[in-house]
Structures are given as structure tokens and as C-alpha cells.
Image (cartoon, rainbow, N blue to C red):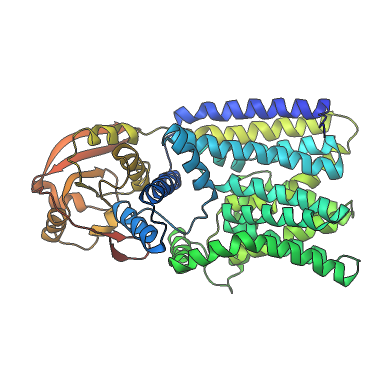
Amino acid sequence: MQVRLSKTDKLFFVYLAVLFIGLAYTFQFNSLLADEGTHLLLSIFYKDLITHTVSSGDFSFGSVYGYAINYLVHYPKLQIAYQPLYHLTNAFFFQIFGPSETIGRFVNLAYAIMAFAMFYFLVKEHFGERAAVIAAVLFSLSPFSLFYSSRAWLDYTSIFWLITSLLLFGRAMKAGGRWRFAACGVATALAFLGKQICGFVLIFYLVTIIMQKKAFRERLESAAVLAITFSLLAVPYLFLFYSVGGIETSATAAIFYSVTKGDPTSLLDPMYWLLYLVRTGAAAPFFPALLLGLAYYAYKKQPHWKTMALFFAVFYICLSAVPTKELRFSETFMLPAYASFGVLLASNKRNILPAAFLAVYCVVSVALFIPTINYYPVKEITTQMMAGIPEGSSIALLSDEGPAFSSVFMWYVAKEGGGPVHKVYRSCAFDGMSADEIKNTFRENGVYYVVYSDKSLRNTIDLVKDDVTYLFSVSKDGKTTSVYKFNGFAMSAGNCNYICITQKEICA
């Protein structure tokens, strides 16, 4: 079947191409953030795990689990709480082109551009080209989209598959057919494997199917096909996730991050449920206007208003129920707001109002995005360190504040070292220790380099300053990271490390 693109389709694709090039250009000016280091570290772990498993020929759970624990001992910033689809995509391209933060960012950006394109076609199918262009531009130029799509983040992997599943679901509801609901189930599972929160859309689908004015048997069959195909991919992953302690770790991490950020953790606290409404506007100034647009759209009972309101309600309630609240998660429940606002602006027959709004929207979003572009030379520091480090020795990071994040150091060490070769110890591993205890830990675990960034909340470096030799430091933007050599270095076969989130020691 030949697909014909309209003039509007082609112009929108040109816009996406320009957006892709513009955001890709910013890669070179941005140093890695903490979560980027974690996601890239997970990506190289999956690549090495698959390579090791295939080359050894041992596909048993014990072998895979043992290799994973050994990797965790070397790099204790690995987090199994994250869904694997983005990291597996990176691992595939790492295998072809080699591990690189640029590859990780290109993968996320490609998913984001595909998500914007899919959202355009989703809105176009229900509301026409004019509304689709406006809605998709609003989505693609939101402060969250500009910031997170240009980094090695996993969100847009799931958002792409979420929007794809919405497009497939709409067609299944309209035309019927088991295979259409099955395709939607697969896309929904992939969205879930991209990020857990996107699995909430299954609730929306099942409620929508049940509310249909069709025979009960037909509704039951549609719901069953969708749920079963979703489960074929999701259940095996959940079983594996449970087997390695992922559920317990995820719950611990959720509470840990909420407490650390000062977010409400009690279900009885009103802010627990209102946080997204109260705080998102600070990061996305047009958030209130878009929400009011959705409310007005529903009040006027415009086409598909019930479906859009239900989608918003399901995602808002479910996201609010999750202890970990990140403002960028609002992009999921804001999808109907972008669509409804696009429809409202498109209804203005003159182009002046939509063009003026989009121009102001673009200027404000870009103005918020530009100050986030900054570079700190962690890569250069690590490269210099790795040039002289003995094989099998360890590194102690005595600070973990930005922009010299421990996860970023671990990513570069894993990349330069070629896998789990050098153990890295985070600053939390030495909290509460005396000077002698720290030095003994260094000796027992073969610590060669000690790294410290000033302005740290910890003073651990002061406890060992007489037992280390200064090698070099790098300063930028008022932040100095110094590298020392531990004078008592001795090669050791220590095989344990400390995991900050669980506050437990783990051994290979």
C-alpha cells in the first residue's frame, strides 16, 4: 500500500528535521547529568552481559545473575529499578558503533522525534492537520521535551510506544479485529518496558472498552486479547524483575528519593495528590494555560472530550499515587491537553492568534532551555586517570555532588576500562568511618585513585589528606575536582562494595 504524504505532512517533517539537528548540535556543549551516567552505565552493562552470555554459552540464571552482581560490585550505581528497553536499544548500537554518550543521546532523541511524529498523526487522525501541527509543536517545544529529549534519558522510548499504542487503540476501537487489539497490546507492553508509568494506559484501555455500547462478549474478547498480548511481554519481565529483588529495590528507591527531595510521602497529605498541579508550572510556564484549555474543551463537550478527560484522569491519579514524583512525568497526562489546545487554536480561522501563541511559546521554552546547556570535563579527568591506573585496582570517589557525579565517573571508567575491571566506591561507603577505617578500606580493596570535588557536603578527604599524594585537578565554573594517589596502595582481591540506596554491602 502506497502512503501519500500531504504538503502539511512534509512541512512538519522538515520542522522535525530542523529540531533534530538543532538539539543534536547541543550534545557537544552538555556534560552528562547523574541519571545520564546511570542510563549509559546500564546500557554498557546490558551490552557486556549479552556478549558474555553468548560467548560463554551459559544461559543459566545463575551465570547471568553472577555476572550482573559482579558488575554491580564494580559500579554500584547500576539500578535495576529502571525498565530495560532504552538501555537494550543503546546496547544494540553500542555493539555496532562502540559505547558512546553521543550514541545514547542520539537514541533518545530519535525516539523523541518519532514520538512527536506519532503524536502528529494521532491528532491528525481525529482532528485534522491544522490541529495536529499545533498540538505536536506544543508537545515538541515544551521545556521538558527540549531538555530531556536532548540527553541520554529513557523517557521518550516509553512515550513513543505509548503514543503508538494510542494510535493503534483508536483504530482497533473504530474498525475492530483481534489483530488490531493484539498490536495495541504489544505496543502497550513495549511502552511499559520503556518506563513503568506508561503501563497505566492499560487501565485507560480496559475502562474505555468496558464503557462501549457493544455486546458484552465482544467487549470481553477485545479486553482479553489486549490484556493477554500485553502480558506475554510484561509478565516474563515482571517475574525476572521480582526474582532479582527489583520490586523491593524499586520501593526503597522511591521512598529514598521522595524523602531526599522533600516531597510528601503520606497519602493523607493533600500535596501528595496536588504536587503536579502546584509545581509543574514553575518548570513549564504554559502548563496552567494548557490545563485550562483542556478544561474548557471538556466543558464545551468538544469531540472526544470524554476520552481525553478519562485519559488525563487515569494518568494523573496513577502518577500521583506513585511516591516518586518527577515533574517531567506530567508529559504523559498532558498529551490530551496539547491535543485540545491545538484544536482550540486551529478553530481560529485567522492564522494570527495561533502563530503569535506558538512564537511566544517557542521563545519562552528555548529561553528556559539555553541556560541548562553547560559543560564540565569529567570525561577529560577520567581519561587522564585511566591512562595510568593499574589493571584491577579501584577508585574511591569522596564526593558525589554535581556536576562531577559518581554515575558519570563510573560510565567513563566502564567505557575506558572495557567493562567490570576497576571497582568504584561512592562517597556514601565511607560515611561515619574514622580515618583509620577509611585507610584500611582503601588497602583492603586496592584503592589507587582518590577523587574529590570541592564544595562537597562531606569532609572525608580531610581525614586522609596525609595519606594521599596530589596528582592533578581540573577547575571550571567555580568547581574544582582533584585526583590523588593513595600512598598505601596494594593490589587486593576485595570483591565487595556498598550500595547507597539499600545501605547494604554486596559481594560478588
Say which residue appears at 31% left-offset and 66% top-offset. 504
**Left or right of residue 476, residue 129 in this image:** right
In the foreground, 474 or 118: 118
**Left or right of residue 59, residue 430 in this image:** left
* Quarter of the image where the C terminus is located: bottom left
Q: Is residue 48 above or below residue 4?
A: below
Q: Residue furthest bottom?
A: 268
- The percent position of residue 480, horizontal first and vertical second, equals 28, 37
- The percent position of residue 96, horizontal first and vertical second, equals 46, 34
Q: Is residue 458 above or below residue 248?
A: above
Label tally: 0
Q: Mark yes or no: residue 186 visible.
A: yes
Q: Mark yes or no: residue 276 visible.
A: no
Say which residue appears at 48% left-offset and 68% top-offset. 242
Q: Is residue 400 above or below residue 24?
A: below
- The percent position of residue 114, horizontal first and vertical second, equals 66, 38
In the foreground, 470 or 230: 230
Q: Residue furthest front?
A: 57
Say which residue appears at 36% left-offset and 65% top-offset. 502
Say which residue appears at 77% left-offset and 26% top-offset. 10
In the foreground, 108 or 142: 108
- The percent position of residue 235, horizontal first and vertical second, equals 59, 65
* Quarter of the image where the N terminus is located: top right
**Left or right of residue 336, residue 349 in this image:** right
